[in-house]
Image: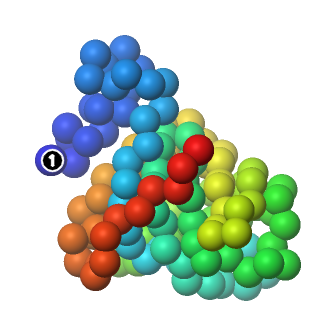
């Protein structure tokens, strides 16, 4: 799927989008800066509003804000952690629509990462 078609798929009113914010499974490494430090993690699903990231250090609390970066790309997305599970954290992007951009870049990189893409239920 082209980047243009992927972004169009997220737009409200698109008949192919049955849900307001459909999650796209991905599987790629991203870099996070939060709580004064930088760490690597995996993004496993993304929507226009947020994403699921794992693993995440236990001391990082719900409400913590940070910046997600896709390596070797211009993508920078500010986020807030909104939920924790045993397998990672759900984040909400702080700017509308940035999830579509993150999805495009991470979806393109998913083929480069070994292992199946696994979306967090919910």
Q: Is residue 40 visible?
A: yes
**Residue 70 at x, y percent in the picture:** 43, 70
| Residue at (46, 51) in percent of width and height | 46
46, above or below 17, in the image? below
Q: Is residue 74 visible?
A: no
**Residue 72 at x, y percent in the picture:** 35, 77
53, above or below 15, in the image? below
Say which residue label 1 marks: 2
Question: Front-most of 59 and 71?
Answer: 59
The colouring scheme, among rainbow, by chain, secondary structure or one colour, is: rainbow
**Residue 74 at x, y percent in the picture:** 40, 65
Left/right of residue 7 with respect to residue 38 in the rendered view? left
| Residue at (37, 15) in percent of width and height | 13
User: In the picture, which quadrant includes the C terminus?
Assistant: top right
Secondary structure state at the residue bearing disc 1: loop
Residue furthest left in the image: 1
Left/right of residue 22 with respect to residue 2 in the rendered view? right
| Residue at (53, 56) in percent of width and height | 120
Question: Front-most of 60 and 71?
Answer: 60
Count of numbered circles on the image: 1
91, above or below 40, in the image? above
- Label 1 packing within 10 angstroms: few (<14), some (14-19), many (20+): few
Q: Quadrant of residue 5?
A: top left
| Residue at (65, 84) in percent of width and height | 38
């Amino acid at each position: 799927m082209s980047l243009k078609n992927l972004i169009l798929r997220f737009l409200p009113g698109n008949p192919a989008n049955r849900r307001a914010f459909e999650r796209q499974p991905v599987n790629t490494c991203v870099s996070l800066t939060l709580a004064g430090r930088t760490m690597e993690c995996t993004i496993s699903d993304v929507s226009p509003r947020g994403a699921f990231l794992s693993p995440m250090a236990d001391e990082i609390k719900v409400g913590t804000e940070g910046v997600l970066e896709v390596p070797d790309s211009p993508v920078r997305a500010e986020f807030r952690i909104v939920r924790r599970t045993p397998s990672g954290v759900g984040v909400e992007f702080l700017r509308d629509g940035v999830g579509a951009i993150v999805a495009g870049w991470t979806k393109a990189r998913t083929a480069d990462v070994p292992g199946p893409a696994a979306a967090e239920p919910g």
